[in-house]
Image: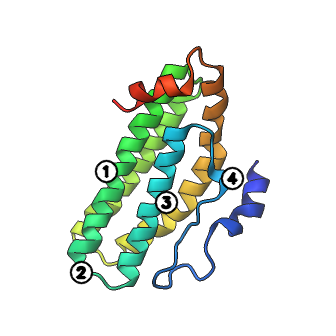
Amino acid sequence: MRDLFQEGRRGFFQQGAGAPGMSLIRWQDTFTIGVADIDADHQVLISLLNQLSETREEGQSRDVVGSVFNVLIEYTIKHFAREERLMELCGFSGLAEHRQQHQRIAERVQKYQRQYEAGCHTAVDELLDFLNNWLVEHIIGEDTHIRSWVEGACIAPRELAPAVQE
């Protein structure tokens, strides 16, 4: 799986990433894990990551960049909780490890947020570099395992959705 990821990874990133108006990551069908709520979350996360990159590249004010930064972090935390709840409902065997990965990522992202708020000019660039790579790897390498557990659960994904939205 890792070799496949490394081989195909370049196709996920937009040519000329970093230029104003250019996305860091383009949504690819390869990112689809087959669970509508999680796929929708991943699309929002990619969109927010791209929006953060664009606001920084366009020279938006610290307040605007900081606002997008905050929304990205808040949505990431909500997504992690939603994904973990789904895994819990499906009896996902790797939940504890997945939850630890989410916790480490949340702590790292919040560290970048604190640095940015303290005036560190490189915090957004560091966050973008980190999330740019981590998000794609995590979706393809980790989150795809959720699908088989949802499919094997006693209840249909559409029945899980209300519980996951809590």
- Whichever of labels 2 and 3 marks the residue nearer the N terminus, that label is 3
* In contact (CB < 8 Å): disc 2 and disc 3: no
Residue identified by numbered label 4? 30
Callout 3: helix, strand or loop?
helix
Instruction: Identify which amino acid the numbered label 2 is placed on.
Output: Ser
Question: What's the CA distance linking mark 4 and mark 1?
Answer: 25 Å
**Picture coordinates of residue 7 (x, y %)?**
78, 62
Q: Which residue is mark 1?
A: 74
Category of crowding for the residue at label 2, using alpha-carbon neighbours closer than 10 angstroms: few (below 14), some (14–19), many (at least 20): few
Q: Which residue is located at x 25 percent, y 65 percent?
A: 67
Location of mark 3 (residue) = 46
Give coordinates of residue 78: x percent, y percent. 36, 42
Label 2 vs label 4: CA separation? Answer: 35 Å
Crowd band around label 4 with a 10 angstrom C-alpha radius: few (<14), some (14–19), many (20+): few
Q: Tell which circle, 3 or 1, labels the residue nearer the N-terminal end.
A: 3
Give the residue at mark 2: 61
